[in-house]
Image (cartoon, helix red, strand yellow):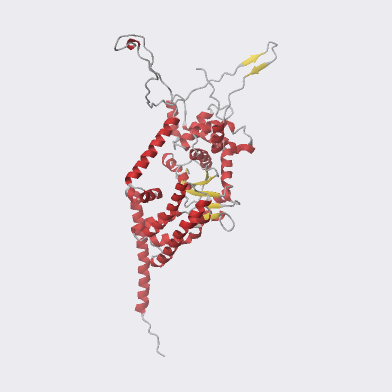
């Protein structure tokens, strides 16, 4: 029998070929990373990932039509804000030396109708005031009985700062990302002696008083059928240097379209926080591919729903090294186009929305899956496009569940938007002092974010509930959540505020 010829050069050639392929994949991956970094750091805004809404408008409208629509939207918003702004009427009388007719000199002048009206927007500086509360004391002529007027309501026993002051401190930090040392300077400019440590104590006191509300808000979200979740890093002060903590957000939308947003703080990114919040609950969870959420989705937990925005981002990053990624982006844009049709028709989250998805989104998904499977063997696994394809195929079941349920979104952008509240804080006050401070910040973030999501003035809301929450029945604590508070306030307007004598 002829012996098989052994050639060491052939074996070495195969090894070199495999090594070249591996190096080529790594080079493509590095090129993709470099292109992405250049886009995000030094690139023009036009080179960054365009929002889906912008892409859809390009298809639907001309440039002139888009500009006209944007102008109309700005005008409507300006008109609405002007109507909501507090107004004060200032009358200007004709001077005494000019109260005669310029034609005949007569002085019998009468107004022909309403005077001329003009609008001027002026800034009236905010002020803090020192209120001196005097309780009336009445003594009986018998000399044995005394009656004293009730003291003013306080957030904290014997506290020197009222609910409006505490509400301003919380809103300044949580809504405006103002560091407390800057707020202390602003308060002092208004004539009130103040230090950063005092404001810090007031901030944590407010969090303690409002803790039943923030806890109930989180429980309402955890019991919802559809929950969005995400997390972002937040630095914590430690010896010599800061350590990394995480701010988690959990949110949902109720049947009335109102958004409930909550936050949790933890010193790690492990699955402990999702388990504490969503453990033992049922429904769906809209998240990215992070495995930390597996603890509440596997094996018998919430049904995981994927995020098409993350998939779209990966294919966009692959464009620099693989122009064919544009085909995947077009498929994904077609899915968002169906959602835009549902919004325009006013059928979002209805049976008609589900039927529209099954008629138009399902064929797009079928075509995209075929494209992914055809492209997968042609791309190096470590290349940007190869990684994007792998990500989409591994998440396919989670990414396609929205077709069968009209209440499920296409992406997790809502939770990412909720976490943007922490971004200005990371730049302004940089870190939290300790774990308890992070927990207090998260609980107050939740109430302020829910206020803003439902058109509630957080400062006005906090000033009211800081007093109410302490005497309100715990079984009806949900009545003090921002959306419920606003609904009841609209139905039953509050009485005029107490007049205080100068």
The reply to whether residue 243 is visible in this rendering is no
| Position of residue 413 in the picture relative to residue 62 (left or right) | right
Residue 260: image location, x then y, percent: 53, 43
Q: Position of residue 261 (x, y in %)?
A: 52, 43
Q: Is residue 496 above or below residue 213?
A: above
Taking the spot 38% from the left edge, 82% from the top edge, the residue there is: 6
Number of disc labels? 0
Could you tell me residue 338's position as x and y percent? 44, 53
Identify the residue shown where x is 39% and y is 50%.
Answer: 56
State the residue in front, 353 or 164.
353
Which corner quadrant holds the N terminus?
Answer: bottom left
> What's the residue at 38%, 36% (across, down)?
75
Find the residue positioned furthest to the left.
103
Asked whether residue 37 appears in the rendered view, the answer is yes
Residue 119 found in image quarter: top left
**Whole-percent x, y for residue 27 in the image:** 35, 62
Drawn side of residue 60 relative to residue 472, left or right: left
Residues 452 and 143: in front is 452
Residue 88, placed above or below residue 350: above
Q: Quadrant of residue 93?
A: top left
Seen in the picture, residue 75 relative to 393 is either above or below; the reply is above
């Amino acid at each position: 029998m002829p012996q098989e010829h052994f050639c060491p050069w052939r074996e070495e050639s195969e090894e070199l070929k495999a090594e070249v392929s591996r190096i080529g994949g790594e080079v493509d991956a590095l090129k993709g990373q470099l292109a992405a970094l250049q886009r995000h750091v030094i690139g023009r805004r036009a080179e960054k990932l365009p929002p889906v809404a912008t892409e859809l408008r390009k298809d639907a409208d001309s440039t002139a039509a888009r500009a006209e629509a944007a102008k109309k939207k700005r005008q409507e918003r300006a008109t609405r804000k002007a109507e909501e702004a507090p107004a004060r009427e200032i009358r200007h009388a004709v001077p005494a030396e000019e109260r005669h007719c310029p034609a005949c000199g007569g002085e019998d002048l009468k107004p022909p109708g309403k005077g001329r009206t003009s609008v001027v927007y002026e800034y009236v500086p905010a002020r803090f005031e020192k209120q001196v509360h005097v309780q009336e004391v009445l003594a009986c002529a018998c000399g044995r009985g005394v009656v004293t007027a009730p003291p003013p309501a306080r957030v904290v026993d014997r506290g020197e700062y009222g609910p409006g002051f505490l509400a301003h401190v919380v809103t300044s930090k949580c809504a405006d990302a103002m560091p407390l040392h800057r707020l202390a300077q602003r308060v002092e400019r208004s004539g009130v002696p103040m230090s950063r440590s005092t404001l810090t104590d007031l901030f944590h006191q407010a969090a303690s008083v409002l803790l039943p509300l923030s806890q109930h808000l989180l429980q309402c979200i955890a019991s919802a059928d559809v929950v969005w979740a995400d997390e972002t890093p937040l630095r914590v002060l430690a010896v010599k240097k800061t350590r990394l903590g995480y701010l988690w957000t959990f949110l949902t939308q109720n049947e009335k379209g109102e958004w409930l947003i909550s936050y949790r703080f933890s010193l790690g990114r492990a699955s402990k926080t999702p388990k504490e919040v969503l453990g033992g609950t049922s429904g769906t969870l809209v998240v990215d591919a992070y495995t930390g959420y597996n603890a509440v989705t596997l094996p018998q937990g919430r049904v995981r729903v994927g995020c098409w925005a993350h998939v779209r981002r990966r294919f966009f990053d692959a464009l620099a090294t693989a122009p064919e990624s544009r085909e995947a982006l077009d498929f994904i844009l077609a899915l968002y186009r169906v959602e835009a049709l549902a919004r325009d028709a006013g059928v979002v989250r209805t049976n008609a929305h589900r039927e529209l998805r099954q008629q138009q989104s399902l064929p797009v998904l079928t075509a995209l899956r075929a494209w992914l499977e055809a492209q997968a063997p042609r791309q190096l696994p470590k290349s940007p496009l190869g990684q994007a394809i792998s990500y989409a195929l591994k998440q396919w079941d989670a990414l396609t569940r929205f077709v069968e349920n009209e209440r499920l979104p296409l992406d997790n952008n809502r939770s990412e938007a909720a976490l943007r509240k922490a971004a200005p804080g990371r730049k302004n006050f940089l870190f939290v002092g300790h774990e308890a401070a992070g927990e207090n910040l998260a609980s107050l973030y939740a109430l302020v974010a829910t206020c803003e999501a439902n058109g509630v003035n957080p400062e006005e809301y906090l000033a009211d509930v800081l007093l109410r929450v302490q005497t309100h029945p715990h079984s009806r604590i949900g009545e003090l959540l921002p959306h419920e508070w606003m609904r009841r306030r609209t139905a039953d307007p509050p009485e005029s505020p107490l007049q205080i004598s100068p």
